[in-house]
Image (cartoon, helix red, strand yellow):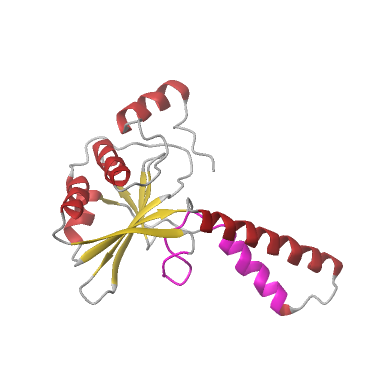
Amino acid sequence: MYELPPSITAPAYFTALSFSYIETFSIGRSLAAIEKQAAFKAEYKELMQKRIRRISFTSKDEKRIWEVESLMNSLYSLYDVHGGINYAAERTHTFNGNHVRTAELLHALQIPVLDIPYYMCAPIYRDGVVFYDVDGNVVSMLSVCLSCYQLQIADGRSIDADCATYDHLKKFFIDLGHEVEHPDVSGGESIRSFMRDGSAADDTP
């Protein structure tokens, strides 16, 4: 049975970071990403019809079906299967390690973890940050869901963060111009809504 990697806390993640600069990404929101997703769906439909009819259907077509299916399912992913930046992730800003925006991000990650939000909904990672070393090599990729309040890094580990961390992250991305879902809802308000209604803010794509 597959076991999820153990989670770490946001302050522990921050402590382990050593980087030179960051890039921020808005995921699955751009017109280009939506158009590519539509093209993948059309290609997938055509390939499946070709497979059913068995007309000139080759092993290459079979391989392409799995590739396209993977691409369709990665609309809200920061990174692709090869560890690079995903087609749906649009870079919005680049900041060096000493920039005020970088300091805002790091402040959010250093907040002590006292009140962790827990939801049963599946995360939709629409925002992300990639950390690079001085030579431009990727140090870490941080995916952010501001609806279900979840953080994940590229090795599959979740990051446990305080409600206040998500409030700071939401403000961080909004200030950068990201079209963040439910911009007026704070982490604490979302938890109270969950306790009352049994669900987090609806973020169905």
Height in image: 119 above or below 24? Answer: above
Asked whether 151 or 68 is in front, the reply is 68
Determine the residue positioned at 64% across, 61% down.
39
Is residue 74 visible to us here?
A: no
Q: Locate residue 66, reporting x and y percent.
A: 64, 68
Q: Locate residue 52, reporting x and y percent.
A: 83, 65
Q: Residue furthest top?
A: 196
Check if residue 61 falls in the magenta segment: yes
Q: Locate residue 59, reporting x and y percent.
A: 72, 79
Count the marks: 0
Is residue 174 visible to us here?
A: yes
Q: Residue furthest left?
A: 98
Q: Quadrant of residue 117?
A: top left
For residue 92, side relative to residue 9 (left or right): right
Asked whether 12 or 43 is in front, the reply is 43
Q: Which residues are magenta?
A: 60-86
Determine the residue positioned at 37% across, 37% down.
118
Asked whether 148 or 85 is in front, the reply is 85
Height in image: 120 above or below 81? Answer: above
For residue 183, side relative to residue 43 (left or right): left
Q: Quadrant of residue 97?
A: bottom left
Q: Locate residue 13, reporting x and y percent.
A: 23, 56
- Dividing the image into 4 quarters, which one contains the C terminus? top right
Check if residue 197 falls in the magenta segment: no
Asked whether 88 or 122 is in front, the reply is 88
Determine the residue positioned at 44% across, 57% down.
3
Determine the residue positioned at 19% across, 61% down.
16
